[in-house]
Image (cartoon, grey):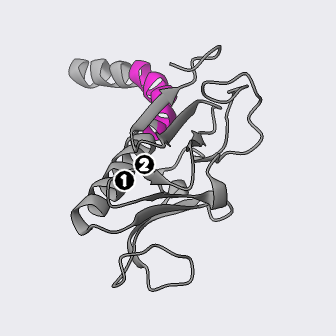
Amino acid sequence: LVVMSILTISTGLALPGFINWLPNYRLKGAVRDLYSNLQLAKSAAIRDRGEWAIQFDKVGNRYQVVGGGADRAYSTAHDNVVLKTVILSDYGSGLSFGPGSATRKVGQNEPIEDCLSYPGDRVVFDSRGMATGTLGGYAYLQNDRNACYAVGTWSSGIVVLRKWNGKAWE
């Protein structure tokens, strides 16, 4: 009985902390997965000597890793191959595209007007691993606690990850 009561008290003390910790843990997992998938698309484009892309769907709250198909050229009208589809709501904790509590874009003092700063809601990597048709961009992810991360690319193909700390991007 003593052991059971100690376990019950310990669980009662630990549970609120775990419940507060879980949404941010899920957001970090989704952010790391997006970062990894951007790296995957970049390396696959180099490997296949073609174009690979991440296609974002804000309304469906998802994104896809897409290869250029037989002609190795990514296009919205061609025979692209979908390698994987990631649905943000599957992570739980109200995960979605959005700025959360962030008040300005990464590297700028402009307010965030859209949760994606990629033209056409996609980033395409060419055979050299560079992002084509853009100077770069970011996808902003948030959870139900308004925490925010930004995952993006530079035109050189470098994939970056930033966290909003309440005042600035880290």
How many marks the image carries: the answer is 2
72 vs 57, left or right, is left
Where residue 129 appears, as percent x and y from the top left, is 34, 52
Majority secondary structure in the magenta region: helix
Q: Residues within 10 Å of mark 1 (few under 14, many from 20)?
A: some
13 vs 36, left or right, is right
Q: Which element is circle 2 on?
A: helix
Residue shown at 27% from the left, 67% from the top: 49
Question: Can you say which quadrant of the picture contains the N terminus?
Answer: top left
Where residue 132 appears, as percent x and y from the top left, is 49, 55
Find residue 44 and report its image quarter: bottom left
Q: Which residue is mark 2?
A: 34
Residue shown at 36% from the left, 25% from the top: 11
Q: Which residue is mark 1?
A: 37
Nearest to the observer: residue 144 or residue 154? 154
Magenta-highlighted residues = 12-27
Nearest to the observer: residue 103 or residue 49? 49
Q: Amino acid at mark 1?
A: Asn
Nearest to the observer: residue 114 or residue 91? 114
Q: Amino acid at mark 2?
A: Leu
Where residue 103 appears, as percent x and y from the top left, is 73, 25
Cα distance between the residues tagged 1 and 2: 5 Å
